[in-house]
Image (tube, rainbow, N blue to C red):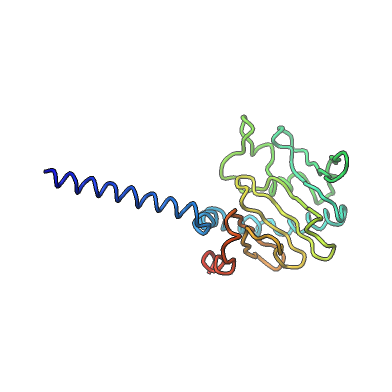
């Protein structure tokens, strides 16, 4: 009887060790986290982009033309229970907030298909779950040299994923902690992980997408 109890105890200990090793592997290996993100969001992001591709391109072109070489963030104030869009100009002594001047094509209805609106927030000011929309559009001139321009759309429900517009069709060169998947010549999905800078990006890409 004692031998059976010892064997059972050893089996329990071994099981706990294996569970600990599995948990440790998940924490230390970025592939597991990135693959989880990809499985949850990849197809949703592509489907949403393809449905609104014309407007994504139109919006980026308008913003880049009206605000060249400007550090800005565009977002909807839906969290404050209004569908007001604001362009936040950064980098000056006093940041400027400018109401987005809507054209006949840049309408609230079309913008709300891309960005979270007041309908996408709960009463406690947290976003509703599984909303396939973006929180903001950001442009940082530090990463743009005038010829190559990058704009990023931050996903509402996951800060580790962004949709990136690249005028040159290239990923950001110093983005060592992310791997990108190109939807077309100028748009790619950026998956971020804090540990990715110590791994081979090409190998990680192949494991995730090939």
User: Number of labelled discs?
Assistant: 0
Counting from the top left corner in percent of width and height, residue 108 is at 76, 44
Q: In the displayed structure, does residue 142 sit left or right of residue 197? A: right
Q: Residue at x 73, y 56 (%)?
A: 56
Counting from the top left corner in percent of width and height, residue 51 is at 66, 57
Return the residue found at the far left.
1
Q: Nearer the viewer, residue 39 or 30?
A: 30
Q: In the displayed structure, does residue 2 sit left or right of residue 13? A: left
Q: Nearer the viewer, residue 118 or 139?
A: 139
Q: Nearer the viewer, residue 177 or 74?
A: 177
Residue 131: name its quadrant: top right
Q: Residue at x 19, y 49 (%)?
A: 7
Q: In the displayed structure, does residue 104 sit left or right of residue 210? A: right
Q: In the displayed structure, does residue 133 sit left or right of residue 207? A: right
Residue 84: name its quadrant: top right
Q: Residue at x 81, y 58 (%)?
A: 61
Counting from the top left corner in percent of width and height, residue 9 is at 23, 45
The quadrant the N terminus occupies is top left
């Amino acid at each position: 009887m004692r031998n059976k109890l010892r064997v059972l105890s050893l089996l329990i200990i071994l099981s706990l060790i294996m569970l600990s090793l599995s948990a440790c592997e998940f924490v230390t290996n970025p592939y597991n986290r990135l693959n989880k993100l990809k499985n949850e969001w990849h197809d949703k992001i592509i489907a949403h982009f393809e449905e609104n591709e014309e407007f994504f391109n139109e919006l980026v072109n308008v913003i880049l033309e009206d605000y060249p070489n400007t550090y800005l963030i565009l977002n909807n104030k839906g969290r404050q229970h209004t569908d007001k869009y604001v362009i936040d100009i950064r980098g000056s002594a006093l940041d400027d907030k400018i109401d987005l001047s809507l054209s006949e094509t840049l309408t609230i209805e079309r913008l709300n298909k891309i960005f979270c609106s007041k309908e996408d927030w709960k009463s406690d000011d947290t976003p509703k779950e599984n909303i396939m929309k973006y929180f903001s559009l950001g442009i940082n001139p530090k990463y743009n040299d005038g010829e190559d321009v990058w704009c990023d759309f931050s996903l509402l429900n996951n800060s580790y994923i962004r949709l990136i517009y690249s005028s040159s069709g290239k990923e950001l060169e110093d983005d060592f902690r992310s791997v990108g998947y190109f939807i077309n010549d100028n748009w790619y999905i950026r998956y971020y992980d804090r540990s990715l800078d110590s791994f081979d990006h090409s190998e990680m890409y192949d494991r995730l997408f090939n």
